[in-house]
Amino acid sequence: MLPIGDDNSSRRTVPLVAYALIVLNVLFFLVEMSGGDAFIMKWAFVPSRFLADPIGDFPTLFTSMFMHAGWLHLGGNMLYLWIFGDNVEDRFGHAKFTIFYLLCGFGATFAQLAFSLGSNVPNLGASGAIAGVLGAYVLMFPQGRVRVLQGQQVIQVPALIVIGFWIVLQLFSSIGSIANTADTGGVAYMAHVGGFVSGFVLTFLFGGNTNRLTS
């Protein structure tokens, strides 16, 4: 199943932050490509390096959220942000959505850190923050429907099924990949899980599950 869009009929604002995040991710990835491995090692989040110097390595908590492992990684993340982020931003408001997105990214990073304390492998990607957006979407739009490309057909599928399928994949994948990811690289599945849980909890704290917030 490939999600290609959702119902935006209730959206009242232009998702300026979501669009800006997409642009920043693409631009930062282009810089990353030109900078090569040296750029990645400098600006990605490296668990062992962060623990050795949290203050000096603090900027990587931000920069790592705008880096990606390749065009497919970037494209998949931006697709989900484009589909689900606009509605969440509309409900929170621009300023609170910005804070929410960054906090979800931090939650994802520290969840991965907890399972890879001594790792020298660079962690990068917007997946954790976007997982938080999905967690918020589940609470805010439980009746939402998503257009999904299935084969050569476009069908309407409940958003809970699309996001639920994504969650199951992350949970099952994380069981066998925690040790491998920490030592040799790969997909940081615990970051996905941590980001989703962060988004779920923050939505309650921000009141986004019941009230329409504006800024």
Image (cartoon, helix red, strand yellow):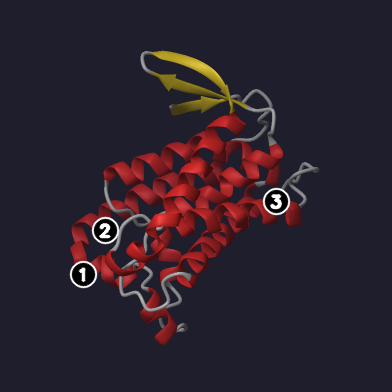
Element type at marker 3? helix
Q: Which residue position is annotated with label 3?
A: 203
**Which mark is first along the chain, 1 or 2?**
2
Task: Measure the alpha-carbon separation of dots 2 and 1.
Answer: 9 Å
The crowding category of the residue bearing disc 1, from other C-alpha atoms within 10 Å (few below 14, some 14 to 19, many at least 20), is few
Residue 157: in sight, yes or no?
Answer: yes
Q: Are marks 2 and 3 in contact (CB under 8 Å)?
A: no
Quadrant location of the N terminus in the rendered image: top left
Instruction: Kindly identify the amino acid type of the residue bearing the numbered disc 1.
Output: Ala
**Which mark is first along the chain, 1 or 3?**
1
Task: Give the residue at the far front of this rendering.
Answer: 176
Image spot of residue 89 (x, y percent): 62, 43
Q: Are marks 2 and 1 in contact (CB under 8 Å)?
A: no
Residue in the foreground of this view, choosing between 195 and 173: 173
Q: Nearer the viewer's eye, disc 3 or disc 1?
A: 3
Instruction: Kindly identify the amino acid type of the residue bearing the numbered disc 2.
Output: Glu
Q: Is residue 149 left or right of residue 91?
A: left
Image spot of residue 37 (x, y percent): 20, 65
Disc marking residue 32:
2
- Say which residue appears at 46% left-offset and 48% top-offset: 172
Q: Which image quarter: residue 210?
A: top right
Q: Which residue position is annotated with label 1?
A: 38
Say above or below: 149 vs 71. Answer: above
Image spot of residue 147 (x, y percent): 51, 22
Instruction: Kindly identify the amino acid type of the residue bearing the numbered disc 3.
Output: Thr
